[in-house]
Amino acid sequence: GADAAAVQVLGASAWEQAAQGAPLALQERAPDDVASLFYTSGTTGRPKGVMQTHRNLLAMTMAYFTDVDDVQPGDAMVYAAPMSHGAGLYNYAHMLRGARHVVPASGGFDPAELVQLAADVGKLSLFAAPTMVHRLVEHVRRTGANVDGFKTIVYGGGPMYVDDLRRAIDTMGQKFVQIYGQGESPMTITALAREHLADTAHPRWAERIASVGVAHACVQVRVVDGEDRPVPTGELGEVVVRGDTVMAGYWRNPEASAQTLRGGWLHTGDVGSLDAHGFLTLRDRSKDVIISGGSNIYPREVEEVLLLHPRVSEVAVVGQHDADWGEVVVAFLVAGEGGAVDDAALHAELDAELDAELDALCLDHIARFKRPKAYRWVPALPKNSYGKVLKTELRAWLQAEGAGSGA
């Protein structure tokens, strides 16, 4: 009925009335019953409701203890990213261990507030998108704040650039763990442990810190071709995963469920490669790969290089339709605080000089055909509430611009 579907607002009179009623009888659920509908972030299309079962969420929680971090009663999880997404899923691990839960007064992500909370609360853990880690680290570098109160910062949900990661570890120490997951296999496909990040003497350390780590203990991970056959070690293909964390399917969407879960494996839509030791390195989602003159260009490779420039704080690389090449590479850049370039200065000689510096940087590190054909300086990159850069929006800007110029 209507009452059963009503939303109860904390503190409202209906809530107070319900709270005074007799407790509901506990209903025992089966492991494969749906526990949660988790909506995808919608960066590549309309959000879909992922049916997460009790088994999925229990396996995800156990995977936190085995592959991410142990939790003690004195620990605290701070929800500085939306609880409706990845950050909220870590409540279970902390609830099971009787740890503390902290909601920032701001209700969101504020680096100064987080630093203060770490000092006041102590043993603070959080889940953050790489863009949030970048902002937190820059704040700590600028202020010299004490970070002893932070215990673990789990990052995921987008590419963490190697330059940003090195700076984060130099600034805050070995507090970082990376996870790679999707709502369809919540928080649990691979993990890059702090031990991996700390093992600087390993001959392949530089490659490993650019990866997303190894398969979580409770899942199998493969990289396959278009016919779902495993590809040889080191070769690119689609990342697929199976195990107790993989969803039951999409809510009221049997076609998408069957397509995504074909053959019993979750097809992630992500492109990557596995090395001989099981470390998975992601390229970009297949929808973000730029095909120029028949060659594949993976945006992250270009983004990593552009971030080496001291003036560049953030970057996103996308493809723009081109009559001759199919697509050409366009880079959107945000200026760093130290070398901030105001709009007035981004013209004439300085503009050309900066473009030339970025071109030279690209030519030093990547193949000539991969360098951007245009650099666009913007005040900020468009992001969703989880901190993910919306490349679909950047491509829409370029499309609108092309239509406006009659191109």
Image: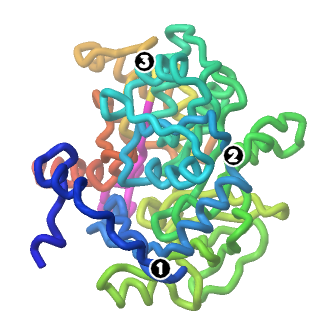
Q: Quadrant of residue 163?
A: top right
Residue range of the region highlighted in magenta in the rendering = 314-329
Figure check: 88 above or below 137: below
Q: Nearer the N terminus, badge 1 or badge 2?
A: 1
Q: Is residue 161 above or below residue 279?
A: above
Left/right placement of residue 256 relative to residue 210 reads left
Q: Which residue is mark 2?
A: 69
Circle 1 packing at 10 Å, graded few (<14), some (14-19), many (20+), is: few
Nearer to us: label 1 or label 2? 1
Q: Which residue is mark 1?
A: 29
How many neighbours does mark 3 have within 10 angstroms: few (below 14), some (14-19), or many (20 or more)? few
Does the CB distance between marks 3 and 2 fall below 8 Å? Answer: no
Instruction: Report the Cα–Cα distance between label 1 and label 3.
Output: 42 Å
Question: Residue 287: x percent and y percent?
Answer: 41, 65
1 vs 3, front mark: 1
Residue placed most toward the observer, 49 or 35:
35
Kindly identify which residue carries mark 3.
Answer: 112
Disc 1 is placed on an element classified as loop
Does the rendering let one see residue 87? yes
Residue type beneath disc 1: Arg
Question: Tag count in the figure?
Answer: 3
